[in-house]
């Protein structure tokens, strides 16, 4: 009677390994597909990254459960358990696939983060350059000089040339205008 209970217990453990193996086969396919989405060239939603990590944790917990059951079967119930080397090999391969896929995912994620940091750093450098360019206009001293020169230019009286077209254009405009050009770069050039 006790032997029948042990046999049924061993069979239930073997069935648990089969169920976990079936789960792993499907989960690893999904896991690989999700990991392919993550690349430094693409914009990846953070939800996908969280899902990948959660699925990897589930895969690892199932692999740990299978290993624990296998150790129990090999240790305590070695005379009642059926050896299945093909199944053992498949489980080992799935563990290896999961580990290498996750390593690739982590590397791609690291590259994605580095790329994002570089982009942010570049944007910060551009912003400081823009600030330096427009800093001249924010200086009170430079504003006073610009306004004084503008008044001087505005008060100048230009002599009209003998051409009729120039006179008409000035009378239509009514006011003078000023165009500022910003040149960026090294001063000698």
Image: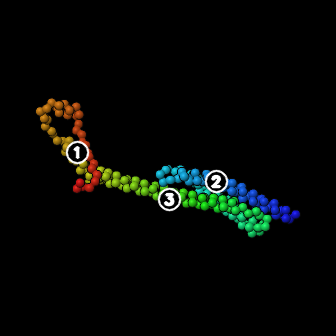
Q: Is residue 143 visible?
A: no
Which disc, if any, is residue 110? 3
| Residue 181 x/y as whole percent | 26, 46
User: Residues at badges 3 and 2 in contact (C-beta under 8 Å)?
Assistant: no
Look at the numbered disc 1 and give the secondary structure of its residue: helix
Name the residue tied to disc 1: 150
| Residue 28 x/y as whole percent | 62, 54
Q: Nearer the viewer, residue 178 or 118?
A: 118
Q: Residue at x 23, y 36 (%)?
A: 175
Q: Is residue 101 visible?
A: yes
Tag 2 or tag 3, which sits nearer the N-term? 2
Quick one: label 3, few (<14), some, or many (20+) residues within 10 Å? some
Q: Nearer the viewer, residue 11 or 140?
A: 11
Q: Nearer the viewer, mark 3 or mark 2?
A: 2
Tag 2 or tag 1, which sits nearer the N-term? 2
- In which image quadrant can residue 169 be found? top left
Q: Is residue 44 left or right of residue 125?
A: right
Name the residue tied to disc 2: 27
User: Residues at badges 1 and 3 in contact (C-beta under 8 Å)?
Assistant: no
Look at the numbered disc 2 and give the secondary structure of its residue: helix
| Residue 39 x/y as whole percent | 50, 53
Q: Is residue 88 left or right of residue 166?
A: right
Q: Residue at x 56, y 53 (%)?
A: 35
Q: CA separation, marks 3 and 2?
A: 24 Å
């Amino acid at each position: 009677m006790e032997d029948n209970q042990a046999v049924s217990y061993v069979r239930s453990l073997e069935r648990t390994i089969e169920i976990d193996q079936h789960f792993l086969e499907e989960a690893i396919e999904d896991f690989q597909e999700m990991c392919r989405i993550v690349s430094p060239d693409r914009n990846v939603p953070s939800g996908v990254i969280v899902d990948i990590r959660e699925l990897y944790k589930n895969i690892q917990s199932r692999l740990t459960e299978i290993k624990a059951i296998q150790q129990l079967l090999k240790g305590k119930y070695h005379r009642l358990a059926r050896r299945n080397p093909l199944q053992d090999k498949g489980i080992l391969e799935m563990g290896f696939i999961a580990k290498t896929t996750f390593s690739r995912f982590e590397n791609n994620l690291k590259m994605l983060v580095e790329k994002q940091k570089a982009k942010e750093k570049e944007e910060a450098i551009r912003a400081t350059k823009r600030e330096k360019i427009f800093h001249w206009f924010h200086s009170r001293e430079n504003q006073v000089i610009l306004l004084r020169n503008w008044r001087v230019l505005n008060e100048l009286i230009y002599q009209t040339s003998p051409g009729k077209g120039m006179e008409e254009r000035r009378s239509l405009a009514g006011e003078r205008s000023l165009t500022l050009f910003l040149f960026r770069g090294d001063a000698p050039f």
